[in-house]
Amino acid sequence: MYSTLVLLPFIALANSAALPPVDLASYVLTSTGETNGGNTFPGVSRPLGMVKLGPDLYSGTDAYSGYLANGNFTGFTMLHESGTGGAPKYGVVSQMPVVGTVNNPLSDAINDTRALPDYTEIGYYKASLGSGTVLEMAATNKAGMFQYTFPSVDKDLNVLVDVSHVLSSYRGQGLEQHFLGGNITVKEDTDAGHYYYTGSGTYDNGWNRAAPWTVYFCGYFDAPASFKTFIGTSLNTSTLAAFSNEETSYSSKTARLGALFTFTQTSVTSRVGVSFISESQACANVNAEIPKGTKFATVYQDTRDAWNTQVLSKVTTTETNVTKLNQLYSALYFMHLLPTNKTGENPLWKSSAPYYDDIFTFWDTHRCTTPLLHILQPVFYEELLRSMIDIYSHEGYTSDARSSFSNGAVQGGSNSDNVFADAYVKGVRGKVDWETAYASMTKNAEVTPDNNNDPRDPTGSTKEGRSALPDWRQYGYITPRFGRSVSRAVEYAVNDFSLATVANGLGLQYDFKKYLSRSHNWRNHWNTNMTALGFSGFLGPRNTSGFISQDPLSCGGCYWADLYYQALPWEYSFNAHHDMGTLVDYCGGADTFVKRLEMTFQPGIYSGNRAFGSTIFNPGNEPSFATPYLYNYVNRQDLSVLRSRFIAKSYYSPTQGGLPGNSDAGAMESWLLWSMIGLFPVTGQTTFLIGSPWFTDLTISLGGGKKLKITTTGGSENVYYVQSLKVNGRPWNKSWVSWYDIFAKGGSLDFVLGSTPSNWTTGPTPPSPGSVSATAAEQLLIDMSKGASS
Ligand SMILES: *[C@@H]1O[C@H](CO)[C@@H](O)[C@H](O)[C@H]1NC(C)=O
Ligand SMILES: *[C@@H]1O[C@H](CO)[C@@H](O)[C@H](O)[C@H]1NC(C)=O
Ligand SMILES: *[C@@H]1O[C@H](CO)[C@@H](O)[C@H](O)[C@H]1NC(C)=O
Ligand SMILES: *[C@@H]1O[C@H](CO)[C@@H](O)[C@H](O)[C@H]1NC(C)=O
Ligand SMILES: *[C@@H]1O[C@H](CO)[C@@H](O)[C@H](O)[C@H]1NC(C)=O
Ligand SMILES: *[C@@H]1O[C@H](CO)[C@@H](O)[C@H](O)[C@H]1NC(C)=O
Ligand SMILES: *[C@@H]1O[C@H](CO)[C@@H](O)[C@H](O)[C@H]1NC(C)=O
Ligand SMILES: *[C@@H]1O[C@H](CO)[C@@H](O)[C@H](O)[C@H]1NC(C)=O
Ligand SMILES: *[C@@H]1O[C@H](CO)[C@@H](O)[C@H](O)[C@H]1NC(C)=O
Ligand SMILES: *[C@@H]1O[C@H](CO)[C@@H](O)[C@H](O)[C@H]1NC(C)=O
């Protein structure tokens, strides 16, 4: 009953069986992962778009993406994140429809219930409010469209613009965002009685403890209105100081402010642009992207077209199982929401380099997301690298994380190093200034960042760099005087291997040897006396007196100031992916290594992971992403297939609650995509571990007309063990391929699948460049970069 004339055709289109095959957008279920801790953003966004327009709900709990399944609407806002934890960020540049007399626009009573569940699809979001108002939303990169259908009632029909609206945090860690002041001005548009408003709001904090930042806005209405501007008495109360149309403009650093527009017609459309540069740029953005008179349906269709052409059509298949197509295209969608392209919108410095923001975080995304974005979006990827370098050049650090133009928060190591190394070994050059990229890496590796006094870990900076460097450099291990000492040690080792890799490529042999040697320092944490479940030898805490006893199946609080961050010693003890040869030896050789991996996936072992059958393995967290594939290092590829398939099929589904943890800016979805593709990237190396593809055929467009074509024969839902493989038409007996085998110039993978395991991986195991002598490693890195594997 709330549907409008414009909406009906969309729903019909989305559900129609007679869709043209090119409309891959219809397979994307934009509600996937919005509940059950997935925290995905279900609103409207273009690929990597700056604007993410959607609802903000209140129900006394942190609404990370703005969305909650329950609670009341408090606003509909233009900036959001997707899939994060920590504390909410953004939820700014708000409009809120209100039916009836508004006596105090700053009152908490300005909220509304849901009359129906929200409706979402690519390019479109609809909220049906208890007041009888229906709000439909569409968006471009830097602007959005709100289409109101108010109820036919004899009451005021209002749209409230509250500049002080932000997403709140209720977890009490001092991470909550603050409104710090703003501006609003209401002006008459060229049409008599039509108004538009411009202004800005300044905010701080949120997820990454950000410095104050400002967003400018410019909003137009297409209907006649009356208006009142308002200003409160302070930043933290809802007491009004003024509420009238005598002042059309307010500016305040000490009070909340906004404007209320009252309409006499039930159908009202608003176009709003945002900018981080100026009000006039916000107006220019909306007038360029959604010019006056633009139909809502046009903005909607353009968004779908953008997703189809820029993202979804890069991966095609003749598969007809709709569930699998939903999973494939929804996962592609969610891994393209962040980071956001703010090129031309960086308020901090002028530069010819691109600018990308909202990196949540490389700790989450360097394993699966950035290597896949490299393949699917090579143009974007080069822009991202240049942006990272530009940020280093102007601010001194490329951080593990960044949002609203502020670095932070670093989860573990300096994982931008791994992103750079991954791009370097895979031959990304273009306009990337590798000397400066490498300078950012040595800064991370050598210069301890200033402490930003994050109460979660007061022992050092959580903003950027590697705050435990003093120990790492002096001792070659990290003592508990630094938070997350053990988990960061293994990450710092991987980061140092990334430096060694790029140094080798740049001909810096002194640095190569130095960082290769430092990349072995994870070994200094290997405590052979730590035992669990019949296995001995794990990464453990130590200080200058020696090892400190530790249960391999406990990470204590598993938080910022603890010994291990968000994962067990058992899990982190698999994470020296550059030095797998040594790791397998330390675990007691290939057979014991396989048994230890098998124990990781055995149900009923670790009650901390009850949601996942009480396995030690936690599918919802990034430190475990590679673990199901590590069997390939000892040529038990069959078990990699068994375990990774089980995880993908058990813990992921294209449903609201269908992710095993926070999406983490698409990290979870990209893990799933690699499972479907049948490969797993070893970030920082050219190696891809081979799994088992889900589809009879999958074609990935690599740019420049190059393609990777993957086929399987003999497989089905329950038949997935690899029997044999041809790479570029030639029989293959290795459990891995190199970038240069199939991606650099394109290629093909043709799998034969069967219902029982087959030990087809009789060839050399994947390279372990950190496990050989410096001379051998140097040669191995050169060979890997040339694709000498093939
Ligand atoms: C939602 O709004 C309804 C109606 O105004 C109100 O009774 C209820 O308390 C609100 N819920 C919350 C969580 O604020
Ligand atoms: C929502 O409004 C109702 C009154 O309509 C009020 O009782 C409630 O506290 C408000 N909720 C919030 C979260 O402001
Ligand atoms: C209002 O906007 C002007 C111009 O953009 C700016 O200089 C001023 O700081 C803003 N005031 C507040 C309180 O944000
Ligand atoms: C409210 O804001 C004022 C400044 O406007 C400040 O002095 C006061 O401490 C704040 N009160 C609270 C409870 O945050
Ligand atoms: C379609 O795919 C889903 C998800 O992988 C699977 O559960 C289902 O069994 C498949 N259906 C058929 C008919 O193969
Ligand atoms: C990023 O935004 C800029 C400015 O709008 C644009 O020129 C560039 O093409 C965008 N990059 C990608 C990968 O879309
Ligand atoms: C392991 O324990 C034994 C016996 O307590 C001790 O002698 C040895 O030094 C320990 N090894 C390590 C690496 O701590
Ligand atoms: C190392 O840790 C052990 C166990 O907590 C403690 O007894 C010892 O004093 C510590 N040594 C140093 C040098 O801090
Ligand atoms: C594969 O080889 C391993 C030992 O290398 C053996 O335990 C396993 O049974 C073999 N599997 C098959 C299917 O031959
Ligand atoms: C693996 O394949 C290579 C290349 O085809 C071949 O030379 C080699 O003999 C094979 N190794 C085994 C153990 O089958």
Image: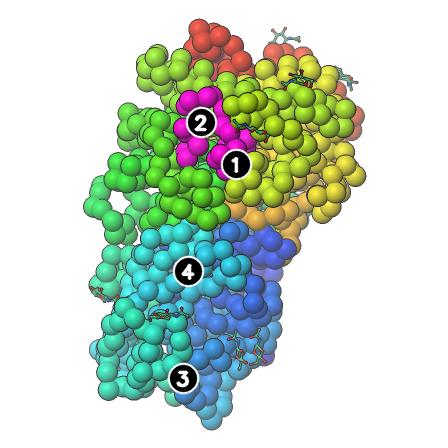
Marks 3 and 2 sit apart, C-alpha to C-alpha, by: 56 Å
Q: Residue at x 52, y 46 (%)?
A: 664
Q: Quadrant of ligand 7?
A: top right
Q: Closer to us: mark 1 or mark 4?
A: 1
Q: Residue at x 29, y 57 (%)?
A: 276
Amino acid type, label 3 = Asn
Marks 1 and 4 sit apart, C-alpha to C-alpha, by: 26 Å
Amino acid type, label 4 = Gln
Q: Closer to us: mark 1 or mark 3?
A: 1
Q: Closer to us: mark 2 or mark 1?
A: 2
Q: Which residue is mark 4?
A: 177
Under tag 2, what secondary structure? helix
Residue neighbourhood size for the residue with mark 2, other residues' Cα within 10 Å, grouped as few (<14), some (14–19), many (≥20): some
Specify the segment rendered in magenta: 466-489
Quadrant position of residue 469? top left
Q: Which residue is mark 3?
A: 104
Q: Which residue is mark 2?
A: 471
Q: From where the camera sits, is residue 717 visible? A: no
Q: From where the camera sits, is residue 471 visible? A: yes
Q: Earlier in the sequence, mark 3 or mark 2?
A: 3
Q: Earlier in the sequence, mark 1 or mark 4?
A: 4
Q: Earlier in the sequence, mark 3 or mark 4?
A: 3
Marks 2 and 1 sit apart, C-alpha to C-alpha, by: 13 Å
Residue 482 lies in the magenta-colored region: yes
Amino acid type, label 2 = Asp
Q: Earlier in the sequence, mark 2 or mark 1?
A: 2
Under tag 1, what secondary structure? loop
Q: Earlier in the sequence, mark 1 or mark 3?
A: 3
Residue neighbourhood size for the residue with mark 1, other residues' Cα within 10 Å, grouped as few (<14), some (14–19), many (≥20): many
Marks 4 and 2 sit apart, C-alpha to C-alpha, by: 34 Å
